[in-house]
Amino acid sequence: MTRLVYLDHNATAPLKPAVIGAMSAALAETGNASSVHRFGRLARRAVENARADVAALVGARDAQVVFTGGGTEANNLALAGLRGGRRLIVSAIEHDSILAAAPDAEIAPVDASGRVDPAALEELLARDPQPALVAVMLANNETGVIQPMAEIVRLAHARGALVHCDAIQAAGKVAIDFAALSVDSLALSAHKFGGPQGTGALIVADRVELSPLLRGGGQERGRRAGTENIAAIRGFGLAATLAANDLAAMQGLAARRDEMEARLRRVAPGVEIFGADSPRLPNTSCIAMPGVSAETQVMAFDLAGIAVSAGSACSSGKVRPSHVLRAMGVDTPRAATAIRVSLGWRTEAADIDSFVETWTGLFARLSGHGSVMPQVSNASV
């Protein structure tokens, strides 16, 4: 039987065993966190303990954490809840949960490396005296490129703008300090670092008012109505603690990723690694195989038992040209050959060997480079 290799952690990371255990225990319990009896108080304690754990992961205070039904809801809540008549500016490489929620937004361009152009952002901010809400992700989900948030926040706040930061891909992979970032809100999603799908959080600075997107009960201090998903929130809290403890190990993936890319360059000197000249998440690589479409690659890797993706996994399973690469100035033919490889807590050296050997074979067979020699296993990966 083919050994299955999972290299799509940016789409979703496998649930960590301890998280499964914590959620199973929570599912066996009864209690609504809004009830005042013993069962309700125990449920409330579980929610508040998890809130503290999530806050600790990103250097926030417990009261700043608003639990949501996922990262998409957190982003939508920020845009709707903070806007209050402000004009909206979003970067060209934002996730669809920002772009689709902001069809009237002004677009801040990025440079060829995928980073927001501070001069262009400053020009947008100065163009209209009306205060703005600026949305820029901390790290891109396709390329892993990390944005210059300190400069973005400085420019925005100098013009009276608020800043929302989608940190969904960055959390658990790099250290985050909400206070030091000085953003006004920050979105998280549990399933990107070993927690359950369908739960997330919006971190909201004390200095801003947040209008609720969902109205009903008074849950989450009136900022997000709806009975809390106790099991998922408990899993989120534990996953946040585990991710904080594993940050050093996650940083170690950068060496494994870099060696993987070096091996591919030895096979195909013309291979493009998008964003490689910028600071990146330690686990992410966006790789173009010359002459072979991303859709063909994804299917071929899947037949070989290896899971990779083409761009974001949040587009109804469709493989389409990446708006991120287009924003970076990559032409459509080149962008159409790019796949995303994302490592994670379960990635082993043998997984990288399997990927490189399969990539080498596909490149030789599908791109017409039949003389390419297969890569041997590299024990240093």
Image: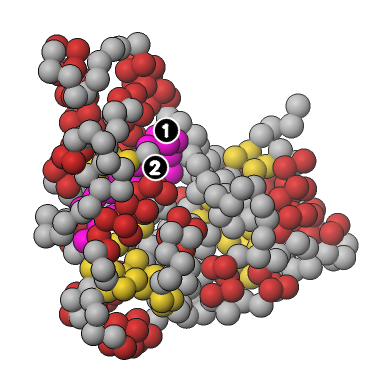
Q: In the image, residue 260 lies at what x, y percent?
A: 59, 56
Task: Residue type at mark 2: give it.
Answer: Gly
- Compared with 115, 243 (above or below) is above
Q: Nearer the viewer, residue 360 or 290?
A: 290
| Figure colour scheme | secondary structure
Residue position for label 1: 196
**Quarter that holds the N terminus:** top right
Residue position for label 2: 70
Q: Secondary structure at mark 2?
A: loop
Give the magenta range.
Answer: 184-204
Q: Is residue 316 visible?
A: yes
Does 345 sit left or right of 4 as displayed? left
What whole-number distance in Å separates the C-alpha atoms at marks 1 and 2?
10 Å
Q: Is residue 252 visible?
A: no
Q: Residues within 10 Å of mark 2 (few under 14, many from 20)?
A: many
Q: In the image, residue 200 lies at what x, y percent?
A: 35, 42
Foreground disc of the pair 1, 2: 2
Q: Nearer the viewer, residue 67 or 286?
A: 67
Q: Residue at x 38, y 62 (%)?
A: 137
- Compared with 8, 368 (above or below) is below
Mark positioned earlier in the residue sequence (1 or 2): 2
Q: Nearer the viewer, residue 116 or 254?
A: 116
Q: Residue at x 73, y 55 (%)?
A: 295
Q: Is residue 31 magenta?
A: no
Q: Residues within 10 Å of mark 1 (few under 14, many from 20)?
A: many
